[in-house]
Amino acid sequence: ICNTIKQCLFLNVKLSIPFGEGDVRLLVRKLRMLSFYACNLMTRTKSSSGKMCVEVIQNEHSCTVGVGESSIELVFGSFDNLLPKIPTTYDSRAKQAVNTFFEMQGKEYSEFPQIVDYYFAKTLAPAVVVSSNAELISNVVYAIGKCTGVHSIPGINGGEYKMMKSLYDPSDTPNLREDILKKGRGSFCAVELICLSEDAQLCVREIIEDSPSMTAFSSSNSALYKEGLFFAVYVKGEITPELRSRASIILS
């Protein structure tokens, strides 16, 4: 939030939300979503004193983010995604990708626009769309990849193509981690993953996690960070709990 508003000298944040139990990743994900809306409100709020107050209040069915006299009401979607009660897409690239995808599908998906908006804001790092519809997944990657500044890597078979090198692999072993890094650190990149078995789903679970992907000799400088990454995963058969827990949204 502080990086968004350069002129803000003093920021007061008041949170009135349940913090949950167990997996802290869910809380971090929620806080990133709340900061997305707070930042958008802050960019439209003027403060002559250099002071701003962000207030978040959650009740059973909704959540309100307020900055000064401006506020936005959010509702909960699948996977506890926070969605604006009045549908709003902020990023022009997200609007383009969503329109292209909806046209290709011949139908609309209510939560998908917000996931794409979160992706371009790097709120979801990474964004992960899962489906048992192979054509839908291909269309998602195509639509995202058409946007300016977005690379795409289609057709990666999770059961056959290495996600990253192991300690004993030759240095020239092809792998997805290095394929992504070659696009440029922090670049936007949409990746199509094809999982034809449960084993394949297990193979991709680390690459789609929200933590950096590192090999045995990785340093913080060589790690694959997930900001800017969009994974569209086709699953044949049942979606495993491990993959489901990493999904931003599941589309049918």
Image (cartoon, rainbow, N blue to C red):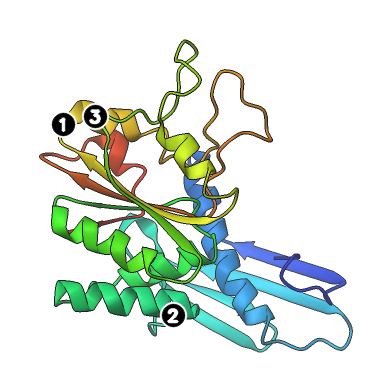
Q: Secondary structure at mark 3?
A: loop
Disc count in the image? Answer: 3
Image quarter (top left, top right, bottom left or bottom right) of the C terminus? bottom left
**Residue labelled with disc 3:** 159
Residue drawn where x is 38% and y is 58% of the image: 80
Residue 164: horizontal and vertical position, in percent? 44, 28
Q: Looking at the image, is mark 2 or mark 3 earlier in the sequence?
A: 2
Amino acid found under the numbered disc labelled 2? Thr
Few, some or many residues within 10 Å of mark 1 (<14, 14–19, 20+): some
Q: Mark 1 near mark 2, Cβ–Cβ under 8 Å?
A: no
Residue 207 spot, x, y in % from top left: 42, 36
Do labels 1 and 3 touch, CB within 8 Å? Answer: yes
The numbered mark, 1 or 2, whose residue comes first in the sequence reads: 2
Query: Left or right of 140: which side holds 171?
Result: right
**Mark 1 or mark 3, earlier in chain:** 3
Q: CA distance from mark 1 to mark 2?
A: 35 Å
Q: Residue at x 26, y 72 (%)?
A: 101
Residue 150, x across and y down, in percent: 46, 62
Q: Is residue 43 left or right of residue 106?
A: right
Q: CA distance from mark 2 to mark 3?
A: 35 Å
- In contact (CB < 8 Å): disc 2 and disc 3: no
Q: Which mark is residue 197?
A: 1
Q: Secondary structure at mark 2?
A: loop
* Label 1 SS: loop
Tell me the CA gap for discs 1 and 3. Answer: 7 Å
Residue labelled with disc 2: 89
Q: Amino acid at mark 1?
A: Ser
Check disc 3 and give the amino acid type: Gly
Give above or below for 98 relative to 179. Answer: below
Q: Is residue 128 left or right of residue 182?
A: left
Bin the neighbour count of mark 2 within 10 Å (Cα to Cα): few under 14, some 14-19, many 20 and up: some
